[in-house]
Every structure is written in structure tokens, then in C-alpha cells.
């Protein structure tokens, strides 16, 4: 996959950081958002492009009654088996990257944001992005938000957080940071500043 001509920003953040809220706020300003999670889900619905390879690698038991990926079963496997996680990623990641690139070409804005939850963990996106934007908040705030939002037990949320890179690792990879440790009113000025900044950088880059 070659880099898209438009200026590209990778948006990421730990679970409960508020990344989805930030993505929505950029979208409200006319920015094209490419949601890699949505693309991945599309690949693993019934009849999805990844399903034949997934079932060949893991067996028919990993499809639900409709023929889509049994997400709960696969999630349990990859959390407990690093080799299974690598095998699944080897199937999905190349397909996701190609679909993300195709989706980025459809937008009309001066720059595009790739919403990539595991951007830092994957280690494969840096060369495709001009900037990495991290949504950040304290880890105890992440924990409280996810428990309140999803009703998951604390142990499960901590396990999910442990499977992601730590806060400091994520911040070290960032070119830009949105501080989401306050209320929603504190986000808007940060988004406005970054939106103006990315527009200037996109204009300086030119059409590619």
C-alpha cells in the first residue's frame, strides 16, 4: 500500500480515553474519518472478505450461526494465546490496510484522520502517517469511564488495558496530544487548534 496523497493523521488512545468523541468532533468540522475498527468488522461479518481465511486458520467453530466471526470466542482465544493473536493479525491487518487506503481516497477534505485504536501496538502505521494524535487521560479515569459505559467488571477492563501499550509508551509515540482529563468544554479549543494546524500542514504539503 502506498501513502495517500492527502495529509494523513493517525488518531489513537487507550480504551476509555475519549478517542471516539474526539473523532466525532473532527468529523463535525468536515474532516474525513476512516474508522479502522468499522472496516475490520466489515471484513468479518457473514460473507466478509476475511472469513474464509479466518475459518481456514481457526476452524468453523469460530463462526456464529449467521456465518460471521464469533467475536467473543475469538477475543477469549487471542487474549490467552499470543500465537493465535499473531495469526489473526496476519490475516486481518493487510486487508485492513488496503481497505483503509481505498476509503481514504474517497474523501474530499484537505486531510484525513485514520482512527486506529491499536496504532502504537501494531508498529506498521508510522510510515503511512504524517502525524500521530493521541487522546490522553489518566489510567484511573480510563478505568472508571469504561466501567460506567460498558458495565464490565474491573478485572476485565484492567485486562483489556494491560493488553494495550501503557500510557507513557503511547505518549512517547505522539506528535500531538489531546488532553481529555477534563470535561467536554475543554476539548473544543484543542480540536480547533489542531484542526487549523493540520489544515496549514496539508496546504503546505500540496496535492501530493
Image (cartoon, rainbow, N blue to C red):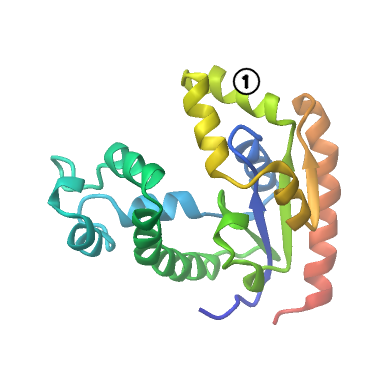
Closest to the observer, 119 or 59:
59
Residue 87 seen anywhere in this rendered image of the structure: yes
Q: Position of residue 66 (x, y in %)?
A: 15, 43
Closest to the observer, 1 or 82:
82
Query: Would residue 79 appear left or right of 4 to someone viewing this image?
Result: left
Eyeballing the image, is 69 above or below 47?
A: above
Q: Which residue is located at x 13 percent, y 40 percent?
A: 65
Query: Would residue 141 appear left or right of 68 to someone viewing this image?
Result: right
Eyeballing the image, is 201 above or below 81?
A: below
Q: Position of residue 115 (x, y in %)?
A: 58, 52
Q: Which residue is located at x 37 percent, y 47 percent?
A: 78
Eyeballing the image, is 123 above or below 133?
A: below
Residue 33 seen anywhere in this rendered image of the structure: no
Q: Which residue is mark 1?
A: 144
Query: Would residue 5 appear left or right of 90 to someone viewing this image?
Result: right
> Quadrant of residue 182 in the image?
top right
Q: Element type at marker 1?
A: helix
Q: How many marks?
A: 1
Question: For the residue carrying disc 1, how many other residues have a C-alpha within 10 Å: few (<14), some (14-19), or many (20+)?
Answer: few
Q: Position of residue 201 (x, y in %)?
A: 82, 67
Q: Which residue is located at x 69 percent, y 25 percent?
A: 141
Closest to the observer, 184 or 87:
87
Q: Position of residue 173 (x, y in %)?
A: 74, 57
Q: Which residue is located at x 77 percent, y 69 percent?
A: 202
- For the C terminus, the quadrant is bottom right
Query: Would residue 49 appear left or right of 120 to someone viewing this image?
Result: left
Amino acid at each position: 500500500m502506498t501513502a495517500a496523497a492527502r495529509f494523513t493523521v493517525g488518531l489513537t488512545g487507550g480504551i476509555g480515553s475519549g478517542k471516539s468523541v474526539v473523532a466525532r468532533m473532527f468529523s463535525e468540522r468536515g474532516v474525513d474519518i476512516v474508522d479502522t475498527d468499522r472496516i475490520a468488522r466489515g471484513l468479518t461479518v457473514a460473507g466478509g472478505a476475511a472469513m474464509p481465511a479466518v475459518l481456514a486458520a481457526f476452524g468453523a467453530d469460530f463462526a456464529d450461526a449467521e456465518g460471521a466471526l464469533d467475536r467473543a470466542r475469538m477475543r477469549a482465544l487471542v487474549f490467552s494465546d499470543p500465537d493465535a493473536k499473531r495469526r489473526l493479525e496476519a490475516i486481518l491487518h493487510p486487508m485492513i490496510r488496503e481497505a483503509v487506503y481505498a476509503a481514504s481516497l474517497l474523501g474530499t477534505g484537505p486531510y484525513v484522520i485514520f482512527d486506529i485504536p491499536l496504532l502504537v501496538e501494531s508498529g506498521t502505521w508510522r510510515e503511512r502517517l504524517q502525524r500521530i494524535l493521541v487522546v490522553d487521560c489518566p489510567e484511573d479515569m480510563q478505568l472508571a469511564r469504561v466501567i460506567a459505559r460498558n458495565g464490565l467488571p474491573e478485572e476485565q477492563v484492567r485486562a483489556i488495558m494491560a493488553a494495550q501499550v501503557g500510557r507513557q509508551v503511547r505518549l512517547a509515540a505522539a506528535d500531538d496530544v489531546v488532553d481529555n482529563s477534563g470535561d467536554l468544554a475543554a476539548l473544543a479549543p484543542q480540536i480547533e487548534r489542531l484542526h487549523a494546524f493540520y489544515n496549514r500542514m496539508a496546504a503546505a504539503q500540496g496535492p501530493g
